[in-house]
């Protein structure tokens, strides 16, 4: 495998990691900010109140995006195997 192929695979791996993690991280961030604002407005500072909505939102996003995530990972795996067979 040439140096260019290795660099390409590293770049694609990092990009795929960012692409797959972004929906889950964004939903966790948005729900966390919403709950934080709600807590500051109502002055309720219960620690468990922040975790339950985030866990439910992240689980929902994972369930909804899992088919797409698996398709992207399968596509990347096929690409890696195709590059490795060109040796």
Image (spheres, rainbow, N blue to C red):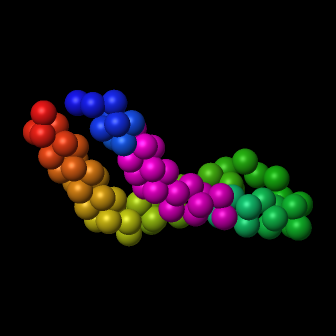
User: In the rendered image of this protein, does residue 51 appear above or below residue 4?
Assistant: below
| Count of marks, rendered view | 0
Report the front residue among 36 and 71: 71
Q: Position of residue 29 (x, y in %)?
A: 65, 58
Location of residue 71 by image quarter: bottom left
Residue 12 within the magenta-colored segment of the rendering: yes
Magenta region's main secondary structure? Answer: helix
Q: Residue at x 56, y 55 (%)?
A: 25
Q: Quadrant of the N terminus?
A: top left
User: In the rendered image of this protein, does residue 85 appear above or below residue 44?
Assistant: above
User: In the rendered image of this protein, does residue 38 appear above or below residue 80?
Assistant: below
Relative horizontal placement of residue 72, taking residue 57 as reference (left or right):
left
Location of residue 27 by image quarter: bottom right
Q: Position of residue 38 (x, y in %)?
A: 80, 67
Relative horizontal placement of residue 66, taking residue 50 as reference (left or right):
left
Would you say residue 10 is visible in this rendering?
Answer: yes
Q: Position of residue 9 (x, y in %)?
A: 34, 40
Q: Residue at x 87, y 61 (%)?
A: 40
Q: Residue at x 45, y 65 (%)?
A: 61
Q: Position of residue 64 (x, y in %)?
A: 38, 69
Q: Quadrant of the C terminus?
A: top left
Report the front residue among 22 and 56: 22
Magenta-highlighted residues = 10-30
Relative horizontal placement of residue 40, taking residue 2 as reference (left or right):
right
């Amino acid at each position: 495998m040439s140096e260019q192929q290795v660099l390409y695979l590293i770049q694609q791996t990092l990009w795929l990691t960012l692409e797959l993690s972004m929906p889950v991280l964004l939903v966790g961030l948005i729900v966390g900010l919403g709950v934080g604002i709600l807590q500051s407005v109502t002055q309720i500072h219960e620690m468990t109140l922040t975790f339950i909505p985030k866990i439910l939102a992240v689980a929902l996003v994972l369930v909804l995006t899992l088919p797409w995530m698996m398709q992207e990972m399968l596509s990347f795996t096929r690409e890696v195997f195709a590059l490795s067979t060109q040796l």
